[in-house]
Amino acid sequence: MGPGSHRGEDRLNVEGEDSLNAADLSRVLVISPHLDDAVYSAGAALSAMDDVVVVTMLAGRPDPPQHTEWDRSTGFASSSEALDIRRAEDEKAVATLGARAVHLDFLDQQYGGADLVALSGAVSELVETHRPQVVIGPLGVRHADHLLVRNAVLAARVPVPLWMYADLPYCNYSRSDEMASRDVLRWRGCVLDEVQPAAGSMDLKRTAVECYPTQNTQFDMNKIVAPERFWAVTRDL
């Protein structure tokens, strides 16, 4: 059992599982590692959902400010400038989808990283605060921060249905990386069943994605403005 797990809730997604209508979702809590991942990975689907809150876990500003290779490659002089602009980009993108953005202050890997137990506790608090119908987090592909946030979601107290989204663009760069992450989850006792929420608007997703000009130069947009994939996650231990 991972940090923050609860013996009485080893099977996730039991409460409300039968009544959840994948085609008509509201009160949705979306967990995003970075300030773009949820929109990149699930933007079209989110545009068709009601009452969506997108929480970026790793949006903290390091103190003192840092100067990292990634920030330099995306045109920023410091972490302070990067976080100010990237938070504004994310707020605009999420609002374009009709959702609300929340930014937490945990640090991403390039600034020193975050603690799994603390992240898991924060996810539990978010679920308690927002009382969602469903929680949607990352499958956790390739990037260490994505794996960390995925593991935090699995370790958290989530007494409502849990879904995971395919991390775009990473899953479209390498299906073998996606399959490796799915295999890890199965090894940990998770069952993944593909689900199909309402498709939403790919045009609206494209508009939202365009709100991240500082990041888009680093990726192939055809791997992001692309079909999205989701899985319902259950776990029997």
Image (tube, rainbow, N blue to C red):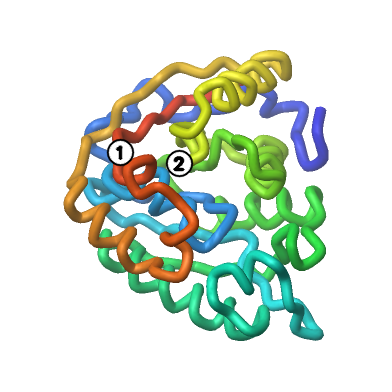
Image coordinates for residue 114, horizontal then vertical, percent: 78, 58
Label 1 element class: loop
Q: Residue at x 64, y 16 (%)?
A: 183
Q: Residue at x 51, y 59 (%)?
A: 55
Type of amino acid at the residue the image marks with label 2 = Leu
Q: Is residue 55 left or right of residue 181?
A: left
User: Would you say residue 131 is visible in this rendering?
Assistant: no
Instruction: Say the numbered circle drawn on residue 133.
Output: none
Q: Residue at x 82, y 40 (%)?
A: 3
Cβ atoms at labels 2 and 1 below 8 Å apart? yes
Q: Work out whether 63 lies above or below 18.
A: below
Image coordinates for residue 27, horizontal then vertical, percent: 36, 50
- Which tag, 2 or 1, sits closer to the chain's start? 2
Dot 1, crowdedness within 10 Å: few (<14), some or many (≥20)? some
Quadrant containing the C terminus is top right
Q: Which residue is mark 1?
A: 226
Label 2 element class: loop
Image coordinates for residue 176, horizontal then vertical, percent: 57, 21
Q: Work out whether 41 lies above or below 71.
A: above
Type of amino acid at the residue the image marks with label 1 = Ala
Towards the viewer: 51 or 19 = 51
Image coordinates for residue 180, horizontal then vertical, percent: 63, 21
Q: Which residue is mark 2?
A: 168
Towards the viewer: 220 or 13 = 220
